Image (cartoon, rainbow, N blue to C red):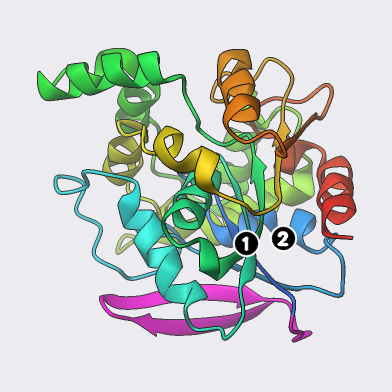
Amino acid sequence: MIKENVKIDTGNIVTYRRSKKTNDILYFSHANGFCGQAYTDLLNKIDNSYEVITYDMRGHGETDLIADSRKLKSWYTFRDDLEQLVKKHNEPVTLSGHSMGGTASLLLALSKPKLVKKLILIDPVILPLRYIISYKLLQIVNLAHLASPLSKNALIRRNLWNSEAEAHKYFSSKPLFKNISEKIITDYVQYGLKKNDQNKYVLKCDPRWESACFKLTSHEVWFDLKKINIPIKIILTPNSVVCNETSQKRIKKLNPQTEICFIDETSHMLPLEKTEDVASEINNFLA
């Protein structure tokens, strides 16, 4: 993929584009703690008639936007960064994303629907409103970590390896990666880690930033979902935790034309576990 530095109001976002330029553009936003090029295998399977662009979100990969974990208050930050990219184009674009990246894409479509032609969300974080209200209350009293063990775990995760090979072996042994191919783990290590001053390998996404992202969610999706009038497809793992059955039913009630499908024998990491199946669902929707 072709690497480009795109200047926005607050700095530079690093994007990665398939070589073919067309009028049909699809932006893909990655999950928290990952990076754009970790999804290369999936993105290369998307319909060749589309210009596919992924990017490193703020605080991830090689993007150099300010990422102060103490000041991150909302996923609107990621929505606004994505808006800066999308506004570079003269026509509406298709947005796709995984997990937090899917939610950021949805937030942009809700706030600026004229910028977006279609939405493809892969296990997006769309929690039931009652969960979000409880979570917001915990945030107010500085107890958000109780509702988000992922936030606490991010702070204590390992973040130093002697080599890429050692890092690859480490991630391959983790449950999160157990159904992900060696090739995709290699992409994650190659593009998600960097050398520090001691010539050791560390995560490009600072664990403090990853933790701060996990502490947040977005209730705003529920207020405008019924107003949006663009094609939406949601691709889920069975028994999704981040977009559970309660959320699915409410989505269909507010926006009946939304298409929801499931990829069997997957986890939250489905776009990295079953790239062929996920790409097939994406391509069917784009056709």
Q: Is 42 one of the magenta-colored residues? A: no
Q: Which mark is residue 37?
A: 1
Left or right of 119? Residue 41 is: right
Residue type pointed to by label 1: Gln
Cα separation between marks 1 and 2: 5 Å
Residue type pointed to by label 2: Thr
**What span is in magenta?**
1-23
Q: Is residue 239 above or below residue 96?
A: above
**Visible residue check, residue 91:** yes
Q: Identify the secondary structure beneath mark 1.
A: helix
Residue toward you, 200 or 158: 158
Figure quadrant of the C terminus: bottom right
Figure quadrant of the N terminus: bottom right
The reply to whether the C-beta atoms of the residues labelled 1 and 2 are less than 8 Å apart is yes
Local crowd size for mark 1, using a 10 Å CA cut-off: few (<14), some (14–19), many (≥20): many
Residue toward you, 3 or 114: 114
Residue at the image position 32 percent from the left and 60 percent from the top: 198
The x, y position of residue 282, in whole percent, is: 81, 51
Q: Is residue 134 above or below residue 109?
A: above
| Residue that label 2 marks | 40
Residue toward you, 99 or 168: 99
Local crowd size for mark 2, using a 10 Å CA cut-off: few (<14), some (14–19), many (≥20): some
The x, y position of residue 186, in whole percent, is: 68, 52
Q: Is residue 203 above or below residue 235?
A: below
Left or right of 39? Residue 45 is: right
The x, y position of residue 123, in whole percent, is: 63, 34
